[in-house]
Image: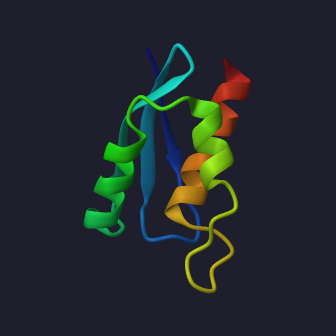
Amino acid sequence: MKNFELQTHGICARTISFGLEDGRIHHIQFSGGCPGNLSAISKLLEGERAEKVVAMLKGNTCGEKPTSCADQLARGVEQALQKM
């Protein structure tokens, strides 16, 4: 499994970490942010295909912010896929 950690910008969570193995996302962890919602996102996405996560979450916003924790996770997964 290849692990990734990204620094976030413009959202409550400070960092997001996750692992990718065989095209699937694992061990998603958010540092900061809304613990209940982010814990739920992590549980719901565990083992999902990385491409599906990107398609589902990329572009989601939080209130009037142009991004969200889910959007930044999707963008981080997309970048990780390009590196692999």
Image quadrant in which you'd find residue 23 = top right
Would residue 76 be visible to someone looking at this image? no
**Residue at the right extreme, as displayed:** 82
Image quadrant containing the C terminus: top right
Image quadrant containing the N terminus: top left
Image quadrant in which you'd find residue 68 = bottom right
- The number of callouts visible is 0
Above or below residue 77? Residue 7 is: below
Protein image colouring: rainbow
Q: Residue at x 38, y 35 (%)?
A: 46
Above or below residue 19? Residue 13 is: below
Q: Residue at x 56, y 76 (%)?
A: 62
Image quadrant in which you'd find residue 27 = top left
Residue 14 x %, y %: 43, 60
Q: Residue at x 63, y 86 (%)?
A: 64
**Residue at the bottom extreme, as displayed:** 64
Q: Is 81 left or right of 19, judged from the image as shown?
A: right
Q: Residue at x 57, y 84 (%)?
A: 63
Would residue 62 be visible to someone looking at this image? yes
Above or below residue 46? Residue 57 is: below
Residue 77 x %, y %: 60, 38
**Residue at the left extreme, as displayed:** 36
Above or below residue 78? Residue 36 is: below
